[in-house]
Amino acid sequence: MGSMPPALSAPSTAAANVVELRTRDAERTQQEILRAAMHEFAERGLGGARIDGIAERAGVNKRLIYYYFGGKDELFLAVLEQTYADIRNAERELHLERLSPPDAVRRLVSFTWEHYLAHPEFLTLLNSENLHRARHLKASSSILEMNSPLVQTLGEVLERGRRDGVFRGGVDAVQLYISIAGLAYFYLSNNHTLSTIFGRDLMAPKALSERLSHITEVVMGYVLRD
């Protein structure tokens, strides 16, 4: 009689392992769908993207996409949220709070530039969402919470700089970040037209290096005290 409890516990352990395996498989499948959708939306836009195309890229049955995400609009929102989560997570790894205020701002500028260069799909997705007047992001329950830590950290960096006497006062963290992002975003998202009208290759290595230096000098010239 004393041997019964181990025998009874074995199926429970096995069942738990099966559930864990299925959970991992489901998470992996969802990530594969998100990656495939990101490329599809970036290449074709929201209007041109097709669930069939996303399913083919991901190597899954399209019914799984509807099962996990509900439809194309819901999937597009999930992709947007993922791209924002990616950049916000990477920004946290910068540990700006450990750097001197000037170094922290310079690091944020260079990171933003480098991230946009490495992830052109992010810019394309933002272009698409702006065409739809942020209709999807307005439906997000997490986007504000996701972006608040960055604003708080940058605000703390600016305040430290002000107290140290190296930064001017009255700098709004949101406005500053928009300027940093905008100086990089406009250049990269419009590089084809800008290169054409000014007769130079703005994506050449030298031009990219010059642009980062220019952005950094513009931003630092604004935040530093005279």
Image (tube, rainbow, N blue to C red):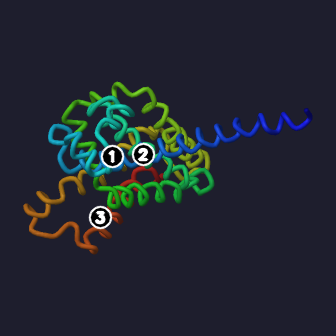
Q: CA distance from mark 1 to mark 3?
A: 42 Å
Is there a contact, CB below 8 Å, between mark 2 and mark 1? yes
* Residue at the image point whose x is 28% and y is 73% from the top: 205
Dot 3 or dot 2: first in sequence order is 2
Q: Is residue 10 left or right of residue 71?
A: right
* Residue at the image point whose x is 54% and y is 55% from the top: 94
Q: Which residue is mark 3?
A: 211
Q: What amino acid does circle 1 point to?
A: Val
* Residue at the image point whose x is 23% and y is 39% from the top: 51
Image label count: 3
Vertical arrangement, residue 44 with respect to residue 69, above or below: below
* Residue located farthest toward the right when viewing the structure as drawn: 2
Nearest to the observer: residue 2 or residue 214: 2
Q: What amino acid does circle 2 point to?
A: Thr
Q: State the mark number for residue 60.
A: 1
Q: Which residue is mark 2?
A: 29
Q: CA distance from mark 2 to mark 1?
A: 8 Å
* Image coords of residue 92 (percent x, y): 54, 49
Q: What amino acid does circle 3 point to?
A: Arg
Q: Nearer the viewer, mark 1 or mark 3?
A: 1
* Image coords of residue 10 (percent x, y): 74, 40
* Residue located farthest toward the front when viewing the structure as drawn: 1
* Residue located farthest toward the bottom when viewing the structure as drawn: 206
SS type, badge 1: loop
Dot 1 or dot 3: first in sequence order is 1
Query: Which quadrant of the figure contains the C terminus?
Result: bottom left
Q: Nearer the viewer, mark 3 or mark 2?
A: 2
Dot 2 or dot 1: first in sequence order is 2
**Mark 3: few/some/many CA within 10 Å (<14, 14-19, 20+):** some
